[in-house]
Amino acid sequence: MGSSCVPSKDPAVRLGDIVENIDRIERHLVGILNEQVFENDQMVYDAVERCLERISEAATKLGSDAELLCPGVPWAQIRALGNVLRHEYDLVQSVRLWYTVQDDLPKLRAAVVDALTRNSGK
């Protein structure tokens, strides 16, 4: 994540962190064919959960820049997911994480990459 040991205030770095963690999730899920396999592979499940926490934290650190750079993305829900994973971990359902990864992350990745591309020359 990020290329520096010092936290960055640059929104592009935070957006890059989101893309990087989505890509990590995709790599973790190679060969995982369905939600049951995902739930039963504890190492993959934990790795995906941790990447989702990072995505949520990057969204939080983006603050209001997130909505400006990627309008239409459900940033409040992304930020809230991190709180759920950290504080209500016992209520997290693997099926919900599975569908988040399958349905929501590709759209988030596309929106973030688009924002990075639009703003790369600025």
Image (cartoon, rainbow, N blue to C red):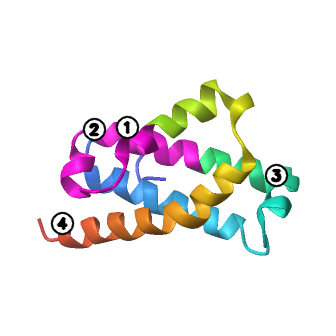
x then y, percent, for residue 76: 37, 40
Of callouts 1 and 3, the N-terminal one: 3
The region drawn magenta spans: 52-79
Q: CA distance from mark 1 to mark 2?
A: 5 Å
Q: Is residue 100 left or right of residue 27?
A: left
In this figure, which residue is indicated by the disc labeled 1? Answer: 60
| Residue 66 lies within the magenta run | yes
Q: Which residue is mark 2?
A: 63
Mark 3, residues whose alpha carbon is within 10 Å: few (<14), some, or many (≥20)?
few
Q: Quick one: SS at disc 4?
A: loop
Q: Sequence order check: which comes first, mark 4 or mark 2?
A: 2
Query: Does residue 47 appear to the left or right of 103 in the view shown?
Result: right
Look at the numbered disc 1 and give the secondary structure of its residue. helix
Q: Quadrant of residue 33?
A: bottom right
Q: Secondary structure at mark 2?
A: loop
Residue at x 62%, y 59% (from the top left corner) = 99
Q: Name the quarter where the C terminus is drawn.
A: bottom left
Q: Who comes first in sequence, dot 4 or dot 1?
A: 1
Marks 2 and 4: in contact by CB < 8 Å? no
Q: Name the dominant secondary structure of the magenta segment.
A: helix
